[in-house]
Amino acid sequence: MASDGPGAVRVAILGASGYTGAELLRLLSSHPHTSIAALSGERSAGSPMGAVFPHLAFGPPGGFVASLPDLTTTASVTIIAQLPLDTVRVVDLSADFRLRDVDMYATWYGAPHAAVELQAQAVYGLTELARDAVRGARLVANPGCYPTSAQLPLVPLLTAGLIKPADIIVDAKSGVTGAGRAAKVGTLFCEAADGMSAYGVASHRHAPEIEQGLSDAAGQPVDVVFTPHLVPLSRGILSTIYVKLADGATADSLRECLATTYAAEPFVHVLPSGVAPPHTRHVRGSNHAVMGVYADRVAGRAILVCVIDNIVKGASGQAIQNMNVMCGFDESAGLGSTPVFP
Amino acid sequence: MASDGPGAVRVAILGASGYTGAELLRLLSSHPHTSIAALSGERSAGSPMGAVFPHLAFGPPGGFVASLPDLTTTASVTIIAQLPLDTVRVVDLSADFRLRDVDMYATWYGAPHAAVELQAQAVYGLTELARDAVRGARLVANPGCYPTSAQLPLVPLLTAGLIKPADIIVDAKSGVTGAGRAAKVGTLFCEAADGMSAYGVASHRHAPEIEQGLSDAAGQPVDVVFTPHLVPLSRGILSTIYVKLADGATADSLRECLATTYAAEPFVHVLPSGVAPPHTRHVRGSNHAVMGVYADRVAGRAILVCVIDNIVKGASGQAIQNMNVMCGFDESAGLGSTPVFP
Amino acid sequence: MASDGPGAVRVAILGASGYTGAELLRLLSSHPHTSIAALSGERSAGSPMGAVFPHLAFGPPGGFVASLPDLTTTASVTIIAQLPLDTVRVVDLSADFRLRDVDMYATWYGAPHAAVELQAQAVYGLTELARDAVRGARLVANPGCYPTSAQLPLVPLLTAGLIKPADIIVDAKSGVTGAGRAAKVGTLFCEAADGMSAYGVASHRHAPEIEQGLSDAAGQPVDVVFTPHLVPLSRGILSTIYVKLADGATADSLRECLATTYAAEPFVHVLPSGVAPPHTRHVRGSNHAVMGVYADRVAGRAILVCVIDNIVKGASGQAIQNMNVMCGFDESAGLGSTPVFP
Amino acid sequence: MASDGPGAVRVAILGASGYTGAELLRLLSSHPHTSIAALSGERSAGSPMGAVFPHLAFGPPGGFVASLPDLTTTASVTIIAQLPLDTVRVVDLSADFRLRDVDMYATWYGAPHAAVELQAQAVYGLTELARDAVRGARLVANPGCYPTSAQLPLVPLLTAGLIKPADIIVDAKSGVTGAGRAAKVGTLFCEAADGMSAYGVASHRHAPEIEQGLSDAAGQPVDVVFTPHLVPLSRGILSTIYVKLADGATADSLRECLATTYAAEPFVHVLPSGVAPPHTRHVRGSNHAVMGVYADRVAGRAILVCVIDNIVKGASGQAIQNMNVMCGFDESAGLGSTPVFP
């Protein structure tokens, strides 16, 4: 984004041939202050957008720019390291700058971090909880989809000391867009439809990202039990979170804390007591996150449920939200669309 | 719509508790010139919108107005007959004013028409093909979903005399929103998912509506073979249309005729030769219609394929498009959203 | 089942107009020792089976018998109480006889138990873990779908003292057949497809049923955190279970315990270490249960995953398995079908 | 199949790593007269069946045999040409031996036929209509899925002269298993779910296969308009067929002809007048074909609808049915399973 304030910003999207890239284009097509300056997608270099994504054929113009390589975990950090951050602002949707501890990065991602000094400048962009830092940032690490759905309800509760840091369990379910657009047998319609499974049990890279955020909030190391699941829907993440109440806390006090925290937020909503639990279809295609808080039958426990659209609030929508904050735009610019139901 | 020109128009939606009502609210939430003045839905009278449709809880405000009865085939015509059409404009999404021949209406709908004189004023609102008439109309009959997908490709070809009026066959497939939101065993997830069937074979009420439009275009009575099918998706209609070429016509000349007819249209698109056939996901959530023309192996024949989102271009989107034309707004107002994919 | 041993058994199915009734007929159509003597389904009284379930039109013969009322929670216990249990054997798929504590039954089901004395004779039929008791039973309470998927992995581990009785969490996901065949808006295709939600949070009736089984195994009262979810597929339950290891226990010792427990079982399978987690499609349409055991990243914890087809092993299949044991048939009779994939 | 009559037959499956191969194994697991002697699947050579298809892990034993190459259009004909047909019987699920006219084969398949002399011995195995020829055959060409659904209703009507040979249109819709198990972007869950499209318009290889069968029946060359569609379900084909009545014929006489033709058939069923049209879910997982006949509103026309499970009656089931006839087994052996619904 080549701009330092309000006005027309020229946007370059690296890796525009994937689902998050297409979603960035869909959302930016209604953004009042941006124009698409460059798109990259190695596999599709030179192809017109309408050939890569026919649903965009009648939307934003602009063909692929072949000069930029496809965005991959290794490539993006290299490209970003070469960008002049005094004139260019970056929102990185990859995982490269999410973990502050570069040793932990090396452990989980199997290679040393390629831009340690840049990491020091990066801001973790869970927008509602890091707005001030994002405002002044040149490089924002956009949070992962699962970490967004887990941290939005948990961080305020740990900060307020309303839940115990121990025995936090996040059972998360994701739609298939989370697996990307690469052709694999496991995500073929006939393999993924009408069934479900857990995957990456006790080994998913989003676990340390969640723990980093919760540890910051708790002021002490927090371990999280995290299990992702693949369910047969295109868009949506639902995280069911099991917590133990701190002394004196109740489900009602947790709900009140979250309702107060997010009272003024346009995209984060806390359901009142007594209404039906959140449904992923009710945020589909939007940047909204909806959460509910429930007292458990088992004494001293509560259950939190949070839903988002994994490629909007969980990826492209939050990236635009961060861009808006960085550029001084209305934070909701390009994000005003109502959820699509059915 | 209480207005005679550009400016803020107050909109009342009768039957807002169904899928097309919800879609009207979703689309109008981005309309620059309208406000919601009244919503009716008998089953849900008095309920806040967010209780009837949670995905709208964070979108447009406004609860249900209990004073208006639910919109039903019989009720709407009665209500409309009582409205002062000199000050109110009506877009009727029901079938009541679609058939000019009130005897045919009585035959297909099982009761005499309740407002014969109003029928004489009604304009059939297939927008692209009736723009001038819609502009001056006080009462527009919004076309059915299947008839929209069938007439957009067929009317220009019959008008131009490029296809024969005989042996036209429309094999149409619809998503389940077409069956409405009433609780029925046949549209339960476990009955409708992962399978398909034909229904209303040789007896669907959209057949005479299609024939009316095609007969007008051909200048002679046209019979149409029409078979609807229910397929396991929420939004989308795909009509596969089998036609015989007039002497001298070719698939290329048909495609050229349609491309010329719709060249300046923002919502109707004719695919060039050699690209993949239209897919319903590529218009999902948008007001776009996309069509392709194919030469058949069998001499003297062509195959047309047209896709729309049945509750947007096939219902609520076209209704707003007609409202925009009636009120002198930008025809695309409230209809600018890019299709949602995946 | 009017028989005391091997040979042709005449089967009466009360409530054959629902999904579990239809599944009983599908499975019994390949059973070598049974014949259908009577079917009841009040809503469908007098209708031929092929009209109620067209997929059965070419399968087992026999129309509905109108003399028996539809099976409902209240009705079945009354009917069963009138049956001569010296000559008739009963497998009750309802919840009436699952809870030994009739006060707890009254609390959870909102009415006093209608057959307290019969309750004393009822055997809880989780077949693999109650085979001897089932063999001599006249009345078997068939386990619920969620309790089957939770108890199969947990009971042997609690019995062996390998996991702690505290902090057991069962996060369960079910296909839509679990909601039954009644016409409701919430289970319409357009409401349930392409999305998911939790329901009955901290209030589902299967929780006390699970706790009863786990408490028996542990020899002390066990509380369970249980959250069911509705996911967009027809058949399948996946339970993700979070447990704490007893001193000295490891994920490997848990897996070994379960592998040993079920080594000779035709329907319960424990995955070896290192293979992909269980997928519901791999048991679809069969009586198989498949489970995996995983060491957690968090010290002292393990994660168990168990999948079943909710209307086979979770209902009709286990009912036939229990019938086979009660009647002295091969326990796999009528249950030999391979899972249907895709 | 190394056998000349009833008794245990040793079956070798070439290409067992695809969906039709897996379905052959599922169905043969309940066959009383066969044993699996060899399985081939190049991609999976050496892998145990449970690794390639986990749903078969608890079903039929037997790992992959690496000595045979994977079954591909080119390879199978070569392998078959080397087999001793005096001792081995072959059912070929590929298209190599379906077209009698080897010049037409070359035109449609882009290469000269590799075994012209074998072609002369091959029998086209649409079982119900070629039973006697199949009985004596050494090599049976198993029909394609679309051609099976089109020829079962059309062949008897053309043979009886009840419909005109001109203007026959087959609009066919298939589930995604028809696209095979190869990893392709177009059949990923996120691309294929919740949408539909036509494909291979006027260019699908099943068209000449259908025309061959209809021309034989009519005793004159018959052209067929054929359009396949991909719909979001795993198993099922629905063909909607538009025909013109011969002089004196009516929809009732067509239905009566088909009902008489298939009266004694265990797998082909003609719906009586007045019942709901056939639904693919009602044949799911079974070898059944169900058809309905409907009078059209347009004079002189009728509409036929036929549903099958594309990988059972449309592939693996019919292959076993042909094997049963060739080997003198009960024609229903291994094919007795009731459809799986929901």
Image (cartoon, coloured by chain):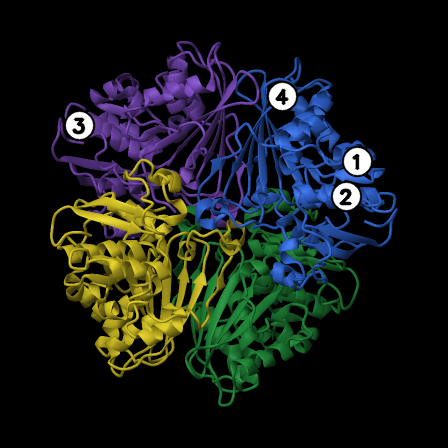
Chain colours: A purple, B yellow, C blue, D green
Callout 1 environment at 10 Å: few (<14), some (14 to 19), or many (20+)? Answer: some
Which residue bears the numbered disc 3? A327
Report the residue marked by disc 1.
Answer: C118
Q: Disc 1, disc 3: CB below 8 Å?
A: no
Q: How far apart are marks 3 and 4 (CA)?
A: 51 Å
In percent of width and height, residue A224 lies at 48, 20
Distance (Cα) linking label 4 and label 1: 27 Å
Q: Is mark 4 on a helix, strand or loop?
A: loop
| Numbered tag placed on residue C223 in the rendering | 4
Q: Distance between the residues labelled 1 and 2?
A: 9 Å
* Chain at numbered mark 4: C
Q: Name the quadrant containing residue C314.
A: top right
Sooner in the amino-acid sequence: mark 1 or mark 2 = 2
SS assignment at label 3: helix
Q: Are marks 3 and 2 in contact (CB under 8 Å)?
A: no
Q: What residue type is labelled 3?
A: Cys
Q: Quadrant of the N terminus of chain D?
A: bottom right
Dot 1 and dot 2 residues touching (CB under 8 Å): yes
Crowding around mark 4 (Cα neighbors within 10 Å: few <14, some 14 to 19, many 20+) is many
- Circle nearer the viewer, 2 or 4: 2
